[in-house]
Image (cartoon, helix red, strand yellow):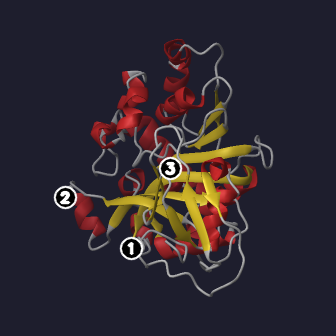
Amino acid sequence: MNRDEVYKPDKMRQKVEDYYGKTLKGSHDLKTSACCPIDAMPEYLKPFLSNVHPEVSARFYGCGSPIPFAIEGLRVVDIGCGTGRDCFILSQMIGSGGTVIGVDMTVEQLDITRKYEKWHIDRFRLNTSNLQFRQGFIEDLSFIEDNAVDVVVSNCVINLSADKTAVFREIHRILKPGGELFFSDVFSDRRIPQNLAEDNIMLGECLGGALYREDFRRMMASTGFEDVRCVQQSPIEITDPDIQAMAGNIRFNSATIRAFKLTLEDRCEDYGQIATYNGGMRFSEHRFILDDHHTFFKDKALPVCGNTADMLSQTRYASYFTVTERKQHFGLFDCHDGSSKPSPASTGDCC
């Protein structure tokens, strides 16, 4: 019997709702370093953050900055949006021609979101609101139609779900072909024991539900994401002695992950393809980081595997790249040639 069969989703949901709706009053109440400090945010995002109401920012519990480039005018869904901090950042970047849909199950969180929604729209000087907020479960996004969303983001929330496979399956369903999943979350170097997974504090601190990287790899492949890339990661420091004692030798890290709704191969194959970044992407004019071992500098050609070529040529990034066509197969692509070693949180052969 697997953990989800023993540990019922309704029970887990109630624990999460209580922790984020009643126990935590702000990010200062957290007992680990999973929540990223403001100074860890990329510089280009800080002006957008300065326009977010302080009460919204104070109740931010994310572990990264999963805000991708080239999202102007797109339809973006933030699953587990909390008080809406990332939604309000996305709203400014997307502009009036796009839509941001925030989904969260915790009433207390959404109450703060809605309290300041008009305040933010006035602050952003938008003619009309490009924001929608829905109370709901991230395992069931049935209010969003198939193939309807350009980008899905999430910030340290999927670990809180008792049915993560359902979450990734729903994300894959609502994404358009070529659409992107870009999320930050907590990963572990082994499966979390049952008693820790059910502990209120371990769960609420995003450790009890941390994704063991090998199970994550299998889960993503089973839901249609064959090649998943790690963009960046950092270790999580546990400062509370009681949590340290419970965690023992388990190592946790926060990681930002990128995946696309594309038909990709389960290994990185070499077709002799070359990709060149042509520049022009807002906030990333001179270089584009696809993942932790693919950095494309403007006008510099780079050999890429077939999967990477498709990620750049069959998505919204296509207008920024020149990618040569497949002409001949040369076997497996040597992903370590001239690049960094694979990240422990990565799932594809090329990452």
Measured in 3D between alpha carbons, the distance from the residue under mark 3 to the one under mark 2, in whole angstroms, is 24 Å
Report x, y in % for residue 189: 38, 73
Rate crowding at label 3 as few (under 14), some (14 to 19) or many (20 or more) other CA atoms within 10 Å: many
Rate crowding at label 2 as few (under 14), some (14 to 19) or many (20 or more) other CA atoms within 10 Å: few
Task: Check the image and name the residue furthest to the bottom.
Answer: 331
Task: Choose the circle earlier in sequence order: 1 or 3.
Answer: 3
Task: Check the image and name the residue furthest to the right.
Answer: 146
Residue at the image point whose x is 42% and y is 21% from the top: 51
Looking at the rendered structure, the kind of residue marked 3 is Val
Report x, y in % for residue 304: 56, 70
Report x, y in % for residue 300: 48, 59
**Between 117 and 320, the one nearer to me in the picture:** 320
Rate crowding at label 1 as few (under 14), some (14 to 19) or many (20 or more) other CA atoms within 10 Å: some
Q: Read off the residue under disc 1.
A: 189
Label 1 secondary element: loop
Q: Does 122 appear above or below 2?
A: above
Measured in 3D between alpha carbons, the distance from the residue under mark 2 to the one under mark 1, in whole angstroms, is 20 Å
Task: Choose the circle earlier in sequence order: 3 or 2.
Answer: 3
**Between 245 and 186, the one nearer to me in the picture:** 186
Looking at the rendered structure, the kind of residue marked 2 is Pro
Q: Read off the residue under disc 2.
A: 241
Question: What is the quadrant of residue 238 in the picture?
Answer: bottom left
Q: Read off the residue under disc 3.
A: 157
Q: Does 12 appear above or below 343?
A: above
Looking at the rendered structure, the kind of residue marked 1 is Asp
Question: What is the quadrant of residue 333 in the picture?
Answer: bottom right
Asked whether residue 92 appears in the rendered view, the answer is yes
